[in-house]
Image: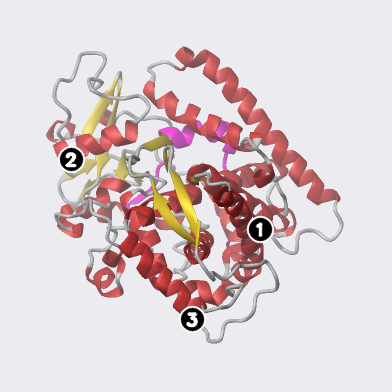
Amino acid sequence: MARTTTGTAAPRGFRSAEHGWPELHRIPHPPRRLPLLGDVLGANRSTPLQDSLKFGRMLGPIYRRKAFNREFVFVWGTELAADLADETRFAKHVGLGIANLRPVAGDGLFTAYNHEPNWQLAHDVLAPGFSREAMAAYHPMMLAVAERLTDHWDRETAADRAVDVPGDMTKLTLETIARTGFGHDFGSFERDRPHPFITAMVGTLTYAQRLNTVPWPGLLREAARRNEADMAYLNRTVDELVQERRTASGGGDGDLLDRMLETAHPETGERLSAQNVRRQVITFLVAGHETTSGALSFALHYLSRHPDVAARARAEVDRVWGDTAVPGYDQVAKLRYVRRVLDESLRLWPTAPAFAREALEDTVLAGRHPMRRGAWTLVLTPMLHRDPEVWGADAERFDPDRFDPKAVRTRAPHAFKPWGTGARACIGRQFALHEATLVLGLLLRRYELGADPDYRLRVTERLTLMPEGLRLRLKRRQGSATARPATAPAADEEAPVSEPRCPVHGAGD
C-alpha cells in the first residue's frame, strides 16, 4: 500500500512560498516586480503556462513568480525534478487549478488530497481495469470508435474539406473512454456541434485556470454562475449514466463502471460510495479523454510537418500490420517507431503540462534549497523536457529517435514525466498509450497528411494543452487496408508490451 499521511497530514490549503521556503530570497524572480501586483508585467492571462516557460528560460531551473499576494516556486531542472520524485520525502500536492476542480471532482483519483482514503481505495479497486487482460478486451471497442472517425474523415476528404484535428480527436477519445469504461455512447460523430458534455467540461477547466489569475474570485461572478451550470450538467449526465447501469440487466462485462459499483477492496472489503462513484466517473471521462486528444493532435501536427518521419512511421505500420484488415491487440505494441513519435510529441507538449510536489517533512531540495513541511513547488514538464543538459542544445527540435532504446537507457532518470510521478501518477497511462498508438497507426495507414503551409502552432491552455485551430487536408492512400471493428484476429507472434509496474504496489516509477 502507498504511504498516506492520514493523521499527520502536511498543512493544507494554499500556502504562499514565503511560508515554506526559508531561503526564498536566493531563488530568482522576474525583473520589474511591482508592489502589491507582483510579477504581472508582460503576463498573458490566457497563457499562464507559456508565460512560465518564458520565465523559466530567462531565470533558470528554479525560480519564483508572484501574482498579487501569492508567490509560487517553479522547478524544471532535471536534478531538482529527480529529487522531488523521492516518495519518502515528497508527495503529490493538490494546488493551483487542480484544487479548483474539487467542487466537481472532489476526492476523485486526480483531485484527492493525500490524506483522503478514497483515492487509495479507488486505485486498488480500479487498477485491475488497466491490466493487460482488460486492455485486450477494450481493443475491439477502440477499433469501433476509430472507424467512426475514419468514416467521418473519409466524407470530409471526399468533399475536399480540411479536417478539424483537435475537435475530432476530442470526439474520438471521449467516445473511447465512454464506451470502454462505462458502456455509454455520446454520439459525438453524429453531431454538428460538440456534445454538451464537452462544452461543460471545457467550461469547468477554463474556469479553474482563470481562478488562478485573479486576486479575488468575486471578480469572476458571471463566470462562476456559468461554472455552476457546467458542473450541474456534468453531475446530471454522470448520474444518468450510473442509473442506467444500476437498472440494466447484464452489467457492463466488467468495465470500469462495473468495478466501481460492484467490486470491494480485496483486503478491507470497502466499496466506493455513490458520491465517490460519481466523482470517479467524472474524473475518468474528463482526464481519460482530454489529455489523449491533445497528445494525438500534437502528434498529427508534427507528422504533417515532418513528411520524412511520417513516411518512416507509415512504412513501419505497413510492415508490421501487412494487409491485415483489423490489427490485433498485440500488433499495436509492435509499432515501436510510431510510439516514439507519440513520446516525442509528449516531450515537446505534454498535455498535462505540470505537476506539483509537496514536502512531507522539513528537507533540503537537491542539497541547496531548504523546504519546510508542507512547502510545495510546481514542476514545469515542458521545460523539464527541454533541459539542454539532458536533451541537448537542439531540445526544441522534433526528433522521435530521442526515444530509441539506446538513447532512453543512457538518459538521466526522471527527465521524461508526461504522466506525473510516483504513487499518484496517471493510472490510465497504458490505456492512453495503446489508444493513441493504435489510432496513429490506423490514420497513417489510411491517409497522407497535408499541412497548411500558413499554419503556425498556437497552444490553447485550459489546464491541459491543445493545438489551436489545427486543420489538415487528407489524401486517401491507394490500396490502404480498411480497419473494421470485427473480431480482431490474434497476432502471429507475441510482442512484449511496455507495461510499467504500478508505483503503489511495485518498485519503480
Q: Is residue 305 left or right of residue 179?
A: left
Viewer-closest of 495 and 417: 495
Labels 1 & 3 near each other (Cβ < 8 A)? no
Q: Amino acid at mark 3?
A: Ala
User: Which residue is drawn at the image coordinates 30% and 36% (left, top)?
Assistant: 50
Q: Earlier in the sequence, mark 1 or mark 2?
A: 2
For label 2, the SS is helix
Magenta run includes residue 99: yes
Q: Amino acid at mark 1?
A: Thr
Labels 1 & 2 near each other (Cβ < 8 A)? no
* Residues at marks 1 and 2, CA–CA distance in whole angstroms: 41 Å
Q: Is residue 218 left or right of residue 417?
A: right
> Can you identify the residue that label 2 sits on?
57
Q: Is residue 223 left or right of residue 22?
A: right
- Where the C terminus falls, by quadrant? bottom left
For label 3, the SS is loop
Query: Horizontal and vertical percent for residue 447?
Result: 49, 60
**Above or below for 67 versus 304:** above
Query: Horizontal and vertical percent for residue 167?
Result: 53, 42
